[in-house]
Image: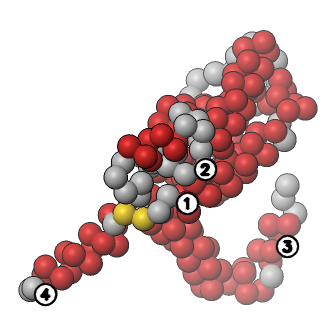
Amino acid sequence: MSALAKIRTAWDAFWFRKVPPHSLAAFRILFGLYLLAYFLRFAPNAELSFSNRGVYAPFLVPDAGLPPFWAWTLYLVTLLVITAFILGFQTTFATPVLLGFFLYYYFLNFAVRDTAFDRLNLIFLATLCFAQLDRAWSLGGGRRARQDQDGLVSIWPIRIITLQIAFLYFGAGFWKLVSPPWHSGAMLRWTLAGP
């Protein structure tokens, strides 16, 4: 086997080999629980945060606040979609819908905070739209896994998520290493003075 063929084989194995679905299912469940907690914290103030009777800050979109009844309806449907995502129920449908809802809330109110974790949530949801999330620990996933001969999933979504987290922490660490305000402690003072 030539050196180029070995490199290509190693590349394909790194990005596309088949692996058991359990780590992806565990990520789906834990990420879904995080999203559920993230959205449930808005429950006492959903009308204030998401309706046209409240205080919200649209980002790069026109005024998109719904009347209170529809804002509550959309909020409750979002919670149901997150629950379906956690349970692994119809994930090929639930994940893109969840991404759409998160984008709506992102541009309605979340983007003005400019937080890395909101952008990371979008990257994770976009990646998971193309993953086989219901192969393990899911409602209705067992039937589909039995139809496949191996029941395995491609590793590429796991690689994308892993690399994204590595890039995020490397970038933050590198910035702290080369930024003088982090060395003096001034940045920490101003960061803790925020929300």
Q: Amino acid at mark 3?
A: Arg
Say whether disc 2 or disc 4 marks the residue closer to the N-terminus. Answer: 4
Say whether disc 2 or disc 3 marks the residue closer to the N-terminus. Answer: 2
Question: Is residue 167 shown above or below 137?
Answer: below
| Mark 1 crowdedness (10 Å alpha carbons): few <14, some 14-19, many ≥20 | some
Circle on res. 69: none
Mark 3, residue position:
189
Numbered disc in front, either 1 or 3: 1
| Mark 3 crowdedness (10 Å alpha carbons): few <14, some 14-19, many ≥20 | few
Q: Secondary structure at mark 3?
A: helix
| Mark 4 crowdedness (10 Å alpha carbons): few <14, some 14-19, many ≥20 | few
Quarter holding residue 50: top right
Residue 124, given in percent of the width and then of the height, sits at 54, 52
Q: Amino acid at mark 4?
A: Ala
Tell me if 147 is positioned left or right of 62 in this view.
left
Mark 1, residue position:
22
Mark 2, residue position:
137
Q: Amino acid at mark 1?
A: His
Q: Quadrant of the C terminus?
A: bottom right
**Residue 166 can be seen in this image:** yes
Q: Amino acid at mark 2?
A: Trp
- The structure residue drawn at horizontal position 47% and vertical position 36%, both measured from the top left corner, is 92
Q: Are marks 1 and 2 in contact (CB under 8 Å)?
A: yes
Q: Quadrant of the N terminus?
A: bottom left
Say whether disc 1 or disc 4 marks the residue closer to the N-terminus. Answer: 4
Tell me if 92 is positioned left or right of 5 in this view.
right
